[in-house]
């Protein structure tokens, strides 16, 4: 009777030791996974040519400043390897838009009022329909007459009774911007800039490699948060365009008020990373 008992007591430690070895191995793998995920940006952050630059065009800054937006995005862009220029408030004029291609930015983020407008609120300027980006330059019917008559520019306000500003449309991008974009990635942090694809077509016809925007109206707090997430996914996490958009929408969701979704153009940019797009 003692022999079976002896064998039994000898077997228990072996089984227990095996179980703890297995648990230790699983925990070790889990720790490695956490370390890998947390440090993933160090493995995937690409090397881009020195002097590669990006711009934040923040037309909303005068009335709706968001320092966290600027600092978070600037940090992600600089970690990626960009030098970053920031244009705020009254910096955002018709001529700034006109000269953007000449500055050779690899990525431009527009934080602006935007959307489809019709008709024009100024009766002496021809009504127009299309997607427009706001400047912070007050409308003056005596300025930019050629561009106004050619439907490149229009006059618009956000709410009735608000100041009227110049806004730029697709024809301004194709006809009056100086030079061409060099595989620039364009992100619009604003309303309804992929409800129609007219602005997207204009930017890509001018040399942009990818255009990302929302398909409906958006609340400002929401779209700022979502744009921060998008830039992080493109830069820090090195995701492709489709992966970055999908991940942003999975974590942030559509706009809670308007149901707007983040989209991209053209379709063939889906599987490309930011580094591939700006080459």
Image (tube, grey):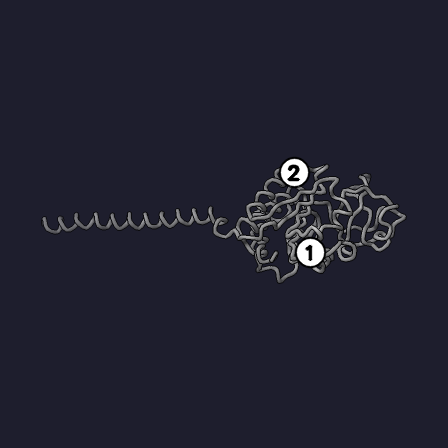
Q: x%, y% of residue 146?
A: 86, 53
Q: Residue furthest front?
A: 50
Name the side, left or right, on which 160 lies relative to 7: right
**Nearest the eye: 231 or 104:** 104
Residue shown at the point (83%, 43%) measured from the top left: 139
Q: x%, y% of residue 158?
A: 77, 43
Mark 2 or mark 1, earlier in chain: 2
Q: x%, y% of residue 51?
A: 61, 49
Q: Residue furthest right?
A: 124
Q: CA distance from mark 2 to mark 1?
A: 27 Å
Instruction: Read off the residue under disc 2.
Output: 66
Instruction: Tell me whether circle 2 and circle 1 mark residues in contact (CB < 8 Å).
Output: no
> How many numbered callouts?
2
Residue 179 visible in the current orientation? yes
Residue 250 visible in the current orientation? no
Q: x%, y% of residue 105?
A: 66, 51
**Nearest the eye: 159 or 278:** 278
Residue shown at the point (80%, 43%) measured from the top left: 165
Q: Which mark is residue 181?
A: 1
Are there few (<14), some (14-19), or many (20+) residues within 10 Å of tag 2? some
The residue tagged with tag 2: helix, strand or loop?
A: loop
Quarter of the figure with the C terminus: bottom right
Q: Nearer the viewer, mark 2 or mark 1?
A: 1
């Amino acid at each position: 009777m003692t022999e079976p008992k002896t064998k039994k007591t000898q077997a228990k430690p072996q089984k227990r030791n095996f179980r703890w070895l297995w648990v230790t191995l699983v925990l070790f793998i889990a720790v490695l996974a956490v370390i890998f995920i947390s440090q993933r940006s160090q493995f995937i952050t690409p090397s881009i040519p020195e002097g590669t630059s990006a711009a934040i065009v923040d037309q909303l800054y005068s009335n709706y400043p968001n320092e966290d937006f600027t600092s978070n995005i600037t940090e992600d862009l600089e970690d990626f390897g960009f030098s970053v220029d920031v244009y705020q408030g009254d910096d955002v004029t018709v001529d700034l838009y006109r000269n953007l291609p000449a500055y050779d930015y690899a990525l431009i983020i527009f934080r602006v009022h935007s959307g489809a407008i019709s008709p024009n609120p100024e009766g002496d300027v021809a009504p127009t329909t299309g997607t427009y980006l706001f400047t912070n330059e007050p409308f003056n019917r005596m300025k930019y007459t050629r561009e106004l008559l050619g439907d490149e520019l229009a006059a618009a306000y956000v709410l009735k009774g608000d100041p009227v500003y110049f806004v730029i449309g697709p024809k301004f991008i194709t006809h009056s911007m100086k030079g061409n974009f060099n595989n620039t990635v364009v992100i619009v942090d604003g309303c309804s800039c992929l409800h129609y694809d007219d602005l997207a077509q204009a930017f890509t016809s001018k040399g942009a490699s990818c255009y990302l925007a929302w398909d409906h109206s958006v609340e400002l707090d929401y779209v700022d948060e979502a744009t921060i997430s998008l830039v992080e996914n493109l830069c820090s996490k090195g995701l492709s365009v489709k992966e970055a958009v999908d991940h942003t929408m999975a974590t942030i969701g559509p706009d809670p008020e308007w149901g707007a979704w983040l989209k991209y153009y053209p379709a063939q940019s889906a599987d490309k990373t930011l580094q591939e797009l700006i080459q």
